[in-house]
Amino acid sequence: MKLKLFKGDASFLLLILIIILIGLGVGFSIYTFRSNPVDDALAANRVINILFVLENEKMPVSTYVLMYYPVTRRAAIFDIPGNLGLLISRINRVDRIDRAYDPARIGAYESEIEKLLDIDINFSVVIAKENLVSIVDLLEGVEIFIPSPVSQIDDEIILFPSGMTILDGDKASLYATYNLSDEDSETAVFRRQRFFQSFLHRQNQMNEILNNPSMSKMYYSYFKSNMTQRTLRLLFNEFVYIDTNRIGIQSVGGTNREVSGQRLIIPLWDGSFIKEVVRQTLETLTREIEAHQTERSLTVEIQNGTAVTGLAGRTADMLRSFGYDIISISNADQNNYDATLIIHRSGDENLVRAFADIIRCKNIRSEIISVEELAELSNIEYKADVTLILGRNFNGRHVTGN
């Protein structure tokens, strides 16, 4: 009798255990279905970093990191050149960053970019050249402005007329990946950047159609990603809030050097410069804009107040990397300024301080004209928001000994 009771208890406990396990499994499945990495990232109110790679023959043709802050709905894009020279961890030598790329496992490539920019990459999206054909055709073409006509590529007659044109899948795939021996490298970079920007813009235009279940399943199957198709669709849905016509694309630059028989771009100041550019960019993305303010960048004029030839031009290139609009470069009224000076006419003190922090300048003077003074002036000469006069205490990157 006792033995039968024990067996009954054991069967009952086993049944309860099975029910609990089934309940946990169902609950986990429901949670997994409802919980989504994109939703979690949006709820956390943090910048979302997405790696985009356009791949041809298992190597990156273009690599971009899109940074998006959902609270302000602002975004920025960094272009990572394939011939950027870094100490690659996997091979333990200085080489092109794209040497770290493995199409089967892009984690190592992603890690190198994370270290370069000092960020965490949340998601990755890879588009193979052959899949780009189908993607663009489903988008019914991508409209792009072509500044100069192209008639021949690799001995083939291929017509890309100048002006605004709509590229179908085949033309878009070729346009985004071709190389010409006589094409300037900067022109090629600019061409691919404009294509990526136009691609994002067209995707936003077609977003409603892409959310159709049958279209969605087909469209997102052409992307290789660390996300599910559902997650990828949710992420791309969020991109509709990005003003793709105004988004800035910044190239990671540096100095060209010959390393082991190949030309590499070595990041400035041992990579610290691009990290600071990224930090400033993230601050811009996350900064709340007051109702009376605008999102425009400061306009800057640079004057060389030293005897160092070309200092203003090099400084302009550096500040453009931070997204500033450099409207003029000239010599100052004298070439013996001891102290670098910032003269600002902008009413936004935060923007001016952010600008000054880039070069660590504390010598700031305001020339803001009141409404009353402005009304009394006629034929007023336009001046930039900021005039930067470089002095002898500017070492090409920072002001020393403020």
Image (cartoon, rainbow, N blue to C red):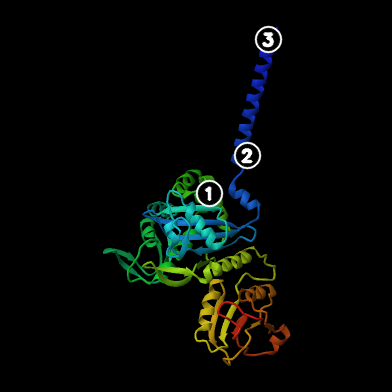
* Structural crowding at the residue carrying mark 3, measured as other residues with C-alpha within 10 Å and reported as few (<14), some (14–19) or many (≥20): few
Query: In the image as oriented, which residue stretches furthest toward the top?
Result: 1
Instruction: Give the number of callouts.
Output: 3
Query: In the image as oriented, which residue stretches furthest toward the front?
Result: 92
Identify residue type, mark 1: Arg
Separation (CA) of disc 3 from disc 2: 42 Å
Separation (CA) of disc 3 from disc 1: 59 Å
Q: Residue at x 53, y 49 (%)?
A: 233
Pinpoint residue 57: horizontal percent, then vertical percent. Answer: 36, 54
Q: What's the mark number on residue 233?
A: 1
Pinpoint residue 168: horizontal percent, then vertical percent. Answer: 38, 57
Pinpoint residue 131: horizontal percent, then vertical percent. Answer: 40, 51
- The first of marks 2 and 1 along the sequence is 2
Quadrant position of the N terminus in the picture? top right
Identify residue type, mark 3: Leu
Q: What's the mark number on residue 3?
A: 3
User: Where is mark 2, residue-wise?
Assistant: 31
* Structural crowding at the residue carrying mark 1, measured as other residues with C-alpha within 10 Å and reported as few (<14), some (14–19) or many (≥20): many
Element on which disc 2 rests: helix
> Is residue 229 or residue 102 the one in the foreground?
102
Q: Are marks 3 and 1 in contact (CB under 8 Å)?
A: no
Eye-nearest disc, 2 or 1: 2
